[in-house]
Amino acid sequence: MTLIAFELSGETPEIPTAEIVGVLESENIPFSFKCQLEQVFIIETPGIDAGLTDILASRLAMTRHIIEVSGVSPANLTDIISMAEKVDFSNLNSLTYIVRAKKIKRKSHISSEDIERGIGKVLYDRGYRADLVNPCIQYRAIVSDNTCIFGPVIASIDSSAFERRKPHNKPFFYPGVLMPKLAQALVNIARVKEGSVVLDPYCGTGGIMVEAGLIGASTLGCDVQRKVLIGAKINLDFYSVNYSLMFQDAGSMALRNNCVDCIVTDPPYGRSALIQARSLDTLMQDSLCEMYRVLRPKGRLVLVSERPVETWAQNAGFRMADLFTQRVHRSLTRRITVLDK
């Protein structure tokens, strides 16, 4: 069995770990939970090959690095060096290396430089060659909760792609939409995978659909505002994803029963929206019943709201799987409700 550590980005305490579990489950990667440290999530798995590592790296939004754990020690320099001396570095052979250390929230009294020098000396004394510019292997030591996790980095996540997909960088911009990093995390929590049919019944300009489509899902979006549907088409065409758009009410969808695998949506609840002849509360209740109807058995809905929706969701037939909160600013806290059919 192999220990794998995910160094988390730290935007929220719970969403990054739920995202990792969602991707592992959607890709049928066997694993068991080992432990959770601040901004570090560790699992045990029979092994992750290069192909699966690439999938994880391409999908995860709130992870920075994925590390194959070679050693664990208390977070003091003597124990860290002692741990490094027991590590088998034979896979290096004639390859070059670099050692990097990260202190989570800088709580440890040890300096990152001392950790890097100490472990680097162990490798140097064994005859291995460092390369600070273009190394073949990066070793990473993460200090969190008085524990040091050490091992080679097997994948790093390119967060610049999410920066390039921010709403104001897209061909069609409309304010008040989710950032792509969060949208991707929610898609992953929904256990979307390549070939999934994913519905966003309040699709707006298509931000969630773009993230699901880039994974390889077939996406379906609905909205009652023609302007934003036209904008969604422009954005979805720009990213060349597989999509269909429908001008229709989320509370009465022209879709057959049990026809979608996953639903991920950010309804306009609590914000200005086009409402036809009924209140936002009524719209939410009606649309939750519709989402339950069109979702396949064992499918998952991930819904963003600004008020509790649990009672309405349970009345529609859903089972609560999880609930996360994310503070946006003083007057707005997002509720991310995960519901299973």
Image: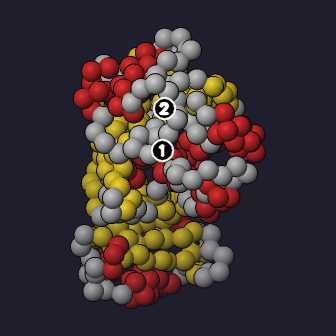
Q: Is residue 22 visible?
A: no
Judging depth in this view, the residue of 65 and 216 nearest the camera is 216
| Residue under the point 43% across and 15% down | 293
Crowd rating for badge 2 (residues with CA inside 10 Å; few <14, some 14–19, many 20+):
few
Residue farthest along the top direction in this orientation: 256
The residue that mark 1 highlights is 272
Q: Position of residue 257 (x, y in %)?
A: 49, 11
Left or right of 44? Residue 314 is left
* Front in this rendered view, residue 286 or 143: 286
Instruction: Residue type at mark 2: give it.
Output: Ile
Seen at 39% across and 44% down, the residue is 270
Instruction: Pinpoint residue 189: horizontal percent, then vertical percent.
Output: 43, 40
Give the SS element for disc 2.
loop
Q: What is the three-letter code of the residue carrying label 1?
A: Ser
Residue drawn at point x = 27 percent, y = 24 percent: 314
Circles 1 and 2 in contact, beta carbons < 8 Å: no
Q: Furthest residue to the front?
A: 277
Q: Secondary structure at mark 1?
A: loop
Which numbered dot is residue 275?
A: 2
- Crowding near pointer 1: few (<14 within 10 Å), some, many (20+)? few
Picture quarter with the C terminus: top left
Evaluate whether residue 101 shows in this view: yes
Q: State whether residue 339 is above or below residue 145.
A: above
In space, the residues marked 1 and 2 are separated at their CA atoms by 9 Å
